C-alpha cells in the first residue's frame, strides 16, 4: 500500500522546487503548483515505483495527497472500487 510519505516523495521528485513538506494532505497541488506535464509525471512515477496504475480518466481527480491515497486504497480493493470512485456509483438495476 502506498503511504503519505511515498506520495510526498514522488511530488518532491517531480517538482523539486515545491515546498511539499509544508503541504497539508488536502492542499490542491494542481492549482498553480503542478502543470499537466508534472501531473502526468507524478502518475508515471507512482506507477513505476509503487505499481499504482492511474488511468487517464482518473488523473484529473487526483489533485491532493489525500485524493491519491484514497485512490490507492480503492485500487487495492479491486477494479470495480476504482471505477466507481472515478465515475460515481454504478447504475442501479
Image (spheres, grey):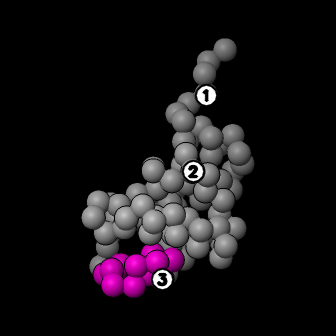
Badge nearest the viewer, 1 or 3: 3
* Few, some or many residues within 10 Å of mark 2 (<14, 14–19, 20+): few
Query: Is 74 situated above or below 28?
Result: above
Sequence-earlier tag: 2 or 1? 2
**At x 65% / y 53%, what residue is drawn?**
75
Query: Looking at the rendering, which quadrant does residue 18 occupy?
Result: bottom left
The residue at the point 59 percent across, 37 percent down is 84
Q: Name the residue tied to disc 2.
A: 56
**Residue 50 figure quarter:** bottom right
Q: Residue at x 51, y 77 (%)?
A: 10
Which stretch did the figure color magenta? 10-21
Q: Which residue occupies 54% across, 42% down?
A: 86
- The answer to if 51 sits in the magenta stretch is no
Question: Helix, strand, or loop for circle 2?
Answer: loop
Q: Nearer the viewer, residue 52 or 89?
A: 52
- Report, in whole angstroms, how far the alpha carbon at label 1 lies from the one at label 3: 36 Å
Q: Disc 1 designates what residue? A: 90
Determine which of the numbered discs, if any, sits on residue 13 in the image.
3
Amino acid at each position: 500500500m502506498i503511504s503519505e510519505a511515498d506520495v510526498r516523495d514522488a511530488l518532491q521528485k517531480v517538482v523539486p522546487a515545491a515546498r511539499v513538506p509544508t503541504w497539508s494532505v488536502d492542499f490542491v497541488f494542481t492549482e498553480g503548483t503542478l502543470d499537466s506535464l508534472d501531473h502526468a509525471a507524478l502518475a508515471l512515477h507512482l506507477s513505476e515505483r509503487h505499481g499504482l496504475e492511474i488511468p487517464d480518466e482518473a488523473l484529473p481527480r487526483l489533485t491532493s495527497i489525500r485524493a491519491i491515497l484514497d485512490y490507492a486504497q480503492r485500487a487495492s480493493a479491486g477494479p470495480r472500487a476504482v471505477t466507481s470512485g472515478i465515475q460515481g456509483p454504478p447504475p442501479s438495476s
